[in-house]
Amino acid sequence: MAGRVAVVTDSTASMPAVLVEAADVVVVPLQVIVDGTPHQEGVDLSPAQLVSALRRGATVTTSQPGPETFARAYARVAARGAREIVSVHISADLSGTVTSAELAAQTAGVPVHVVDSRTVGMGLGLAVAAAAQHRDDGARAARAAAARAHGSTVLFAVDTLEHLRRGGRLGPVAAALGTVLGMRPVLGVRDGRIEVVDKVRTSARARDRVVSLTVEDARRRRRPVVAVHHLGDPDLAADLAERIEAQVPAVHRVHVAEVSAVVGAHVGPGLSAAVVADA
């Protein structure tokens, strides 16, 4: 751990391993419960195993870490020499993870700045990377994370809305678009919640719309950084990344990352997602 400030996040950030290593971030795993058996994502359950479980019809639910899990993580980084901790997490409207982090922060041996990113996936991951650039000042690192998260855009399309509906992450009106009305919504994370951004007729058009909206957004930024997510379909993600790069010459970088198992449990196979932020 370089510097006086340690950076902690949770596994829903879906950060590629190379970025976790480069940013020297501690990742606290969430739980995925498959047919009643709990798993720590990224420890004993991979996204590929999750996809297999979903496709065979397993009952899959998720759970945030308890305060004691964060307390142990904070104690470990403090023992390694951290004098402050910045703990950046998935939107409080999508998970209780932030609450657990806040409770653990109250009894930590060093100051802990808990940041509700109001987003998920690499919207969160890029905010974490921003925090890691300020190892000398915890308050400044927390502000950098919040600013990048606030300025990010997360857009995605899924093959079915059933997983989001079952998990309570999508309202009944939005869910009806993909069932009763036969529409394919393009979804986004806005102010911490999942909302319908646009409506099209097919999954292919929904993916195209994710790309076109991402391109429009990235072109408005001076130094955009983009991330593309998938679940069990790296070829699809590579195609989305290539299409975005071809249309946005100014793009600073495109990260391609599979979503975490917890996020995957709520979106299901067939995910196409893109994140845009300022570099």
Image (spheres, rainbow, N blue to C red):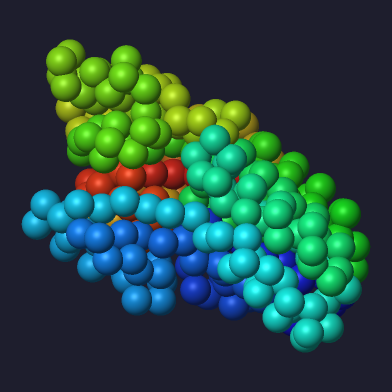
The total of numbered circles placed on residues is 0
The residue positioned 73% from the left and 44% from the top of the image is 146
The residue positioned 58% from the left and 56% from the top of the image is 125
Give the side of residue 189 with respect to residue 186, left or right: right
| Residue situated in front as seen by the camera: 19 or 84 | 84
Which of the 4 image quadrants contains residue 204? Answer: top left
Which of the 4 image quadrants contains residue 213? Answer: top left
| Residue situated in front as seen by the camera: 245 or 188 | 188
71 to 174, vertically: above or below: below
131 to 267, vertically: above or below: below
Give the side of residue 46 with respect to residue 109, left or right: left
Rendered-image quadrant of the N terminus: bottom right
Residue 92 on image: x %, y %: 59, 40
Which of the 4 image quadrants contains residue 148? Answer: top right
Give the side of residue 141 with respect to residue 271, left or right: right
Q: Return the residue found at the far left.
A: 56
Residue 197 on image: x %, y %: 42, 22
Residue 83 on image: x %, y %: 88, 73
The residue positioned 31% from the left and 59% from the top of the image is 33
Q: Return the residue found at the far bottom.
A: 80
270 to 258, vertically: above or below: above
